[in-house]
Image (cartoon, grey):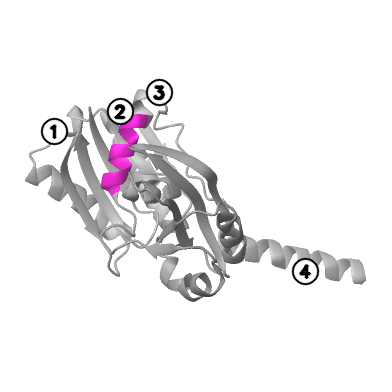
């Protein structure tokens, strides 16, 4: 089984191809460039380097959210376009699940933290039985204090990872009562390789969709939409007062 993985849900842009138990290629960039500039050129480079015929892939895995609204739209549009052109199914991987799978096989609990701004995080909690990932807290958008309290209730050692770690590190050190670690640099951000490998399990379980069916999962409204609704509410309140 051959899976193409795409992840542009955060600051990282990542493309990978996995076939059965082998990672054929991965191209990951964590730098200040827009994903619209990087994702397709990265895919083209991988296709060239491993002489990949895209028609031979069985499915396209994509980080389905939450994450950056712009990044998710770029990843979604790329995956949909490829799926339609190649007539291949898509496998939508929840972004937080994909990050957690970086630490497949960990004995500790795994808690990804994505910075969602305003002291909020996109997060979840996972445990592993060999290569099987069990979800203890499904991905959600919550305040950092809330997730730390939830995780502490399990009374187990925890590994934190994700771009939220440097943002919330001080709060974790001050308020988390149990033993914890931070994942090392090569495991602590989105990786398309993890998506592609996890997607193989999804594929066997029949958790696929057509390119036309795919829609990213944002969990929260975009800031522009929140501001628009806030202004609308303020305007309505002023009319009531008048």
In space, the residues marked 1 and 2 are separated at their CA atoms by 13 Å
Q: Closer to the observer: label 3 or label 1?
A: 3
Q: Which residue is mark 4?
A: 234
Element type at mark 1: loop
- Quadrant position of the C terminus in the picture: bottom right
Pick whichever, 120 or 209, lies toward us: 120
| Sequence-wise first label, 3 or 1 | 1
| Sequence-wise first label, 2 or 4 | 2
Circles 3 and 1 in contact, beta carbons < 8 Å: no
Q: Closer to the observer: label 2 or label 3?
A: 3
Pick whichever, 68 or 238, lies toward us: 68
Residue 120, position as x, y percentages in the image: 57, 64
- For the point 47% across and 44% down, the residue is 216
Q: Which residue is mark 1?
A: 53
Q: Where 73 sits versus 214, above or below?
A: below
Pick whichever, 240 or 21, lies toward us: 21
Give the magenta range. Answer: 192-201
| Sequence-wise first label, 2 or 3 | 2
**Label 1 crowd bin: few (<14), some (14–19), many (20+), radius 10 Å:** few
Q: Which residue is mark 3?
A: 206
232 relative position to 126: left or right: right
């Amino acid at each position: 089984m051959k899976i193409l993985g795409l992840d542009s849900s955060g600051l990282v842009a990542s493309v990978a191809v996995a076939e059965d138990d082998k990672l054929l290629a991965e191209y990951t960039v964590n730098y200040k460039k827009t994903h619209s500039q990087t994702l397709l050129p990265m895919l083209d480079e991988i296709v060239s380097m491993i002489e990949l015929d895209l028609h031979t892939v069985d499915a396209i895995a994509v980080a389905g959210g939450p994450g950056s609204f712009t990044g998710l739209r770029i990843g979604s549009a790329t995956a949909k376009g490829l799926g339609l052109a190649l007539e291949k199914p898509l496998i939508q991987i929840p972004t937080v699940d994909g990050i957690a799978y970086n630490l497949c096989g960990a004995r500790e609990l795994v808690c990804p933290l994505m910075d969602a701004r305003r002291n909020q995080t996109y997060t979840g909690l996972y445990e592993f039985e060999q290569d099987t990932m069990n979800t203890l807290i499904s991905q959600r958008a919550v305040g950092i204090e809330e997730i730390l309290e939830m995780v502490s209730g399990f009374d187990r050692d925890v590994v934190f990872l994700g771009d939220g770690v440097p943002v919330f590190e001080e709060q974790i050190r001050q308020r988390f009562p149990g033993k914890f670690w931070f994942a090392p640099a090569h495991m602590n951000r989105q990786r398309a390789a993890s998506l592609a490998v996890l997607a193989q399990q999804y594929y066997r379980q029949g958790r696929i969709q057509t390119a036309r069916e795919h829609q990213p999962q944002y969990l929260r409204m975009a800031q522009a939409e929140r501001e628009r609704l806030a202004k609308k509410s303020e305007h309505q309140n002023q009319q009531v007062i008048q």
